[in-house]
Image (cartoon, rainbow, N blue to C red):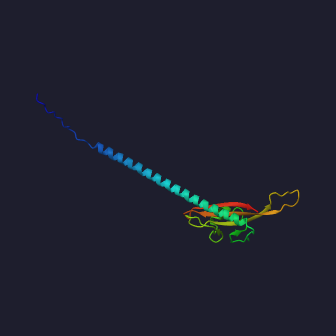
Amino acid sequence: MKPTAQYFPIPQHRQSGMALITGLIFMVVLTLLALAAMRTTTLEERMSGNASDRDLAFQAAEAALRAGEQAVSGATTPAFALGTAYTPRIAAGTLSTYWPTHPWATQSVAVWQPAGTSAAPRFVIEEMPATACAGGSLAVGPTPECGVYRVTARGVGRSANTMVILQAVYQR
């Protein structure tokens, strides 16, 4: 027997390009997903950079705070005068606005500048009203007074806009 050729009928309607449209829509959706992922990654990198910068500023402020405490605990107490790094008590109720706008460059003491910071950390020592020394007895007689000092330190990070202010109260 002789093999016969099979013929396939040619469809009478033409394709309308649905596969092309579906493929393009799929590509647009994938592109939008990729852009959203890039935006999220960029935001996370920025957030971790800011957190790292704040940590650096905190460490610098902590170093300045320790240097200020050492200055207070020294053998002699420095002279306190307005307009210097050793200042009399700041008026009550003005602390929240005073320290961020304080002229740190002229009225504070600079300490060693850690690598990576934009400026050296600085501190100010504020003389507070004296209080009764710990360990005294009111029944025995007058209690000696001890000096109280508030040490305020400021540290900055890689960016000068990243600032941390720390305070400690010291009695001697």
Tell me which residue sits at (79%, 61%) in the image. 131
In which quadrant will I find the C terminus? bottom right
Q: How many marks?
A: 0
Quadrant housing residue 97 = bottom right
As drawn, the residue found furthest toward the front would be: 75
Percent across and percent down for residue 66 are: 67, 62
As drawn, the residue found furthest toward the top would be: 1
In this view, the residue in front, 10 or 37, is: 37
In this view, the residue in front, 89 or 25, is: 89
Left/right of residue 168 with respect to residue 12 in the rendered view? right
Left/right of residue 18 with respect to residue 87 in the rendered view? left
Tell me which residue sits at (70%, 63%) in the image. 69
Quadrant housing residue 82 = bottom right
In which quadrant will I find the N terminus? top left
Percent across and percent down for residue 67 are: 67, 65
Check the image and report above or below for 108 versus 16. Answer: below
Left/right of residue 14 with respect to residue 51 in the rendered view? left
As drawn, the residue found furthest toward the left would be: 2
Percent across and percent down for residue 23 are: 32, 45
Left/right of residue 51 with respect to residue 79 in the rendered view? left
Residue 71 visible from this viewpoint: yes
Residue 94 visible from this viewpoint: no
In this view, the residue in front, 77 or 95, is: 77
Percent across and percent down for residue 77 are: 75, 68
